[in-house]
């Protein structure tokens, strides 16, 4: 988390990074606001930001983009679209 917060200070396009982890499954959820002209560019910015944070803490990332990942993108003013009620 510290790496995300430290990098946030260097990238004006990224705001409010946060993470949550489930230790029993090894799943980590990362959330942030990425300012961009379109959703695809926002996704790339967020992906690169996350990769930089991982490298900052000394983790190797070769091939990580081919691992299982799910990314949800929504306009910041419509973030409620990212969640659904059961």
Image (cartoon, grey):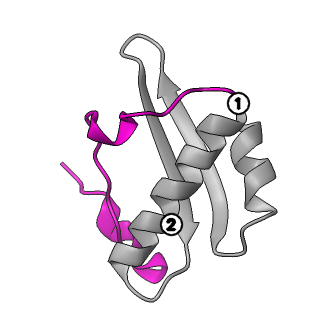
At mark 2, the secondary structure is helix
Circle 2 residue: 45
Q: Which residues are magenta?
A: 57-86
Look at the image and tell me in which quarter the N terminus lies. top right
Residue 75: numbered disc = none
Circle 1 residue: 57
- In the image, 28 versus 11, the foreground residue is 11
Q: Is residue 29 left or right of residue 49?
A: left
- In the image, 42 versus 15, the foreground residue is 42
Specify the farthest residue to the front. 62
Give the CA separation, mark 2 to mark 1: 19 Å
Residue 58 image offset from top left, x and y in percent = 68, 27
At mark 1, the secondary structure is loop
Q: Is residue 43 left or right of residue 45?
A: left
Q: Is residue 81 magenta?
A: yes
Sequence-wise, the earlier of marks 2 and 1 is 2
What residue do we see at 80% from left, 50% from top? 6
Residue 62 image offset from top left, x and y in percent = 43, 33
């Amino acid at each position: 988390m510290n790496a995300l917060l430290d990098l946030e200070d260097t990238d004006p396009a990224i705001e409010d990074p946060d993470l949550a982890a489930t230790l029993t499954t090894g799943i980590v959820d990362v959330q942030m606001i990425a300012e961009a002209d379109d959703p695809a560019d926002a996704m790339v910015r967020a992906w690169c930001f996350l990769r930089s944070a991982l490298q900052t803490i000394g983790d190797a990332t070769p091939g990580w983009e081919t691992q299982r990942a799910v990314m949800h993108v929504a306009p910041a003013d419509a973030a409620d679209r990212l969640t659904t009620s059961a």
